[in-house]
Amino acid sequence: MYNEDKTSAYLRQRLDSIAISYQGMPARGSRRRPVEQHLRVILEVCDGDKSPPLSAAGFLRHQGACYGVTPPAANFRFFESPEESTENASSANSQHDKELPVTAAQNGNWWSMAASIYLGTMGVAALNWPHAMASLTWVGGVITNVLAFFISFYTLYEMLEMHEMKGRRCNRYRELGRLAFGAKGPFICGALQYGALVAIVISYLVICGESMHAFYNIVCRGDCPAYGRSAWIATVGCVSLLLGIVPNMSSIKTFSALAAFAGVAYTAIGVGGSVSAGLHAERDTGHHAQWNLDGRSTVGGIFEAWAAFGAFVYSYGTHAVVLECQAQIPSPSFRPALAGSIIGYLAAGFNMFSLAFAGYWAFGQSATEVIFLGTIPGPQWMLALADLLVVVSLLGQWQLFIMPIFDAMEGVLLNHISNLQRWQQLLVRVGFSVLITLIGVIFPFFGDFAQLVGAVAAVPNAFILPALIHQRVMKPPASSWRSWANWGINGISMIVVVLGAAGSGRSTVLAAIHNDYFA
C-alpha cells in the first residue's frame, strides 16, 4: 500500500504538467491522445483496476475520488473547446483586478474611448510623416498611408470584437494571447506589446525634451542660460513622474481629453503653417518644393524608403493598449468601444493625413524629422505655442501607454505580495520612470531606434497578431473573405517587418555613430 499523501502530491504535480501541455490543443485529434493515455495511467495509480474507461466527462466526474486531487478549473477545462479552456484563465490576475491600474474601475464610455484611440493613433510618429513621405514620394506615400490606415482599423475592429465573448473579458493583450495560443500566448503577446510600449514611452520623452528645448529657445531669444537637449529630456522625465502616480487608467480621462485637444490644435497650426509656407514659396520663387528623389543615392534611397514603412506603421500603437482602454467600459463594451474607436480613428486619420500631405506639399525633400523643429516658418509666438501643445499632447499619450506597463509590473508584485501598499506601488513606478528617462538622456537618437521597434514590434501588435488571433479564436470558414483577409494581412505585414527593420536598423546605426552624447 503506497503513501496517500505522497501519491496526492505526485498526482497534483503531474496534473499541473498535463494542464500546461494541454493548453491550446484542438478539441479532437491525435495530439490529445498521448495526454489522454497519460491520464489513464494516473487513474490506474489512483484506483487500480477499478478505473473506468476514460472520457472527458467521466474523468472530470471521477477524478475527485483521487484522494482529493481536484485540479483548478482554470487549468483543467481542456476537454472542452479551446475557447472554453480559458473561461477562468482569461484574466490571469482576476483575483487582483480591483488592485491593478487597468481593471480597478469601469466607468469609461464612448467619449473616453474616442480620446484614448485618438491619442494612441495621433502620436509622435505623425510629426515625422512629411519627412517619411519624402522617401516614398506622392505615389508611394499616399498608397502606404491609405492601406495602413484601413488595414489597421480592420484589425482594431477584430480586437474590439474579441474583447468580450460569452461573458468572458480579455482585458489585456496577453489574456487574448492566452485565449488563442494557450500557455505560451501571454509570453508571445506580452513580449511584443511591452517591447513596443517601452520604446514608445522613451521616444515620447525624447521628442518632448526636444520640443521643450525649442520652446525655451523661442521664448528666451538668447537672453537665458543655454541648456542642452539632455537637460530638457531629464526635465520632462521629472514631469512624467507626477503623471505616473495616478492610481489607474480611469483617472487619466480628463488629462487624455486635454491632450487630445492639444493634438488637434497643433495639427491645425502645422497644416496652416505648411500651407502658408508653401504658398509664399511659390509666390516668391515661382516654383514649388522639390518632390522627386534627385540627389539621393540609390542605396540610401532604398533604405530610407524601407525605414519610412516603419515610421508610418509606428503611428498605430493604439493596438497595444486598445484592450486595456476597452476594459474601462462596463459590459457590454463592444458598441460604445466601437463608436469611440470610429470617432477617434477618423479624427486621428484626418489630422495625420492633413499634416503629412500639407507638410510634404510645402517642403518636399527638405521636411525635417519633427515638423515643428525647424521646418515651419512663421511668427515666433505660433511656433512656441505649437511646441508647447506638442509637449502636452505627448505627455498625455505617454501616460496612456505607460499604464499597461505599470499594470504588468504591479501584477507580478501582487503574485508575491498579498497586500501591495501604495508606497510600494509608487516606488515601482518612480523607479521605472527614472530608468526610461535615463535611457532617453543617454540615447537621444532613440527616435530612430523607435522606428526599428515600430517595424519589429508595432507591426505584429497592430497587424499580424490581431489577424492571427482572430483566425484561431473566431475560426472563420477557410473560404470566407475574413479568412482570406486575415492571411493576406499576415503576408503583407511580414514583408513590412523585414523591410522596415532593415531600413530603420541602418538609420539607427548611422544616428548612433554621429550622435553627440549628453549634448
Image (cartoon, helix red, strand yellow):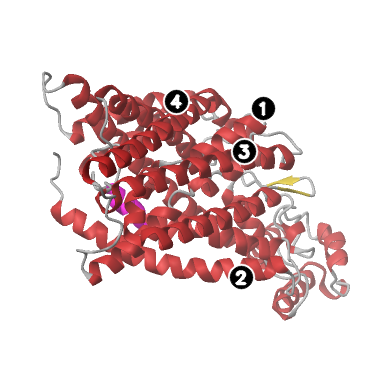
- Label 4, label 3: how far apart the Cα atoms are: 29 Å
Q: Badge 1 is on which residue?
A: 107
Disc on res. 487: 2
> Which amino acid is tagged 2?
Trp
Q: Quadrant of the C terminus?
A: top left
Toward which corner of the image does residue 511 lie, by quadrant? bottom left
Is residue 462 within the magenta segment?
no
Question: Does residue 100 show up?
Answer: no
The label nearer to you, 4 versus 3, is 3
Q: Quadrant of the N terminus?
A: bottom right
> Which amino acid is tagged 4?
Ile
Disc on res. 336: none
Q: Which residues are magenta?
A: 446-452
- Label 4, label 1: how far apart the Cα atoms are: 19 Å
- Label 1, label 2: how far apart the Cα atoms are: 36 Å
The percent position of residue 370, horizontal first and vertical second, equals 30, 42
Mark with earlier residue (3, 2): 3
Q: Badge 3 is on which residue?
A: 343
> Which amino acid is tagged 3?
Ile
Q: Secondary structure at mark 2?
A: helix
Look at the picture and state if 67 lies above or below 163: below
Q: Secondary structure at mark 4?
A: loop
Q: Badge 4 is on which residue?
A: 245
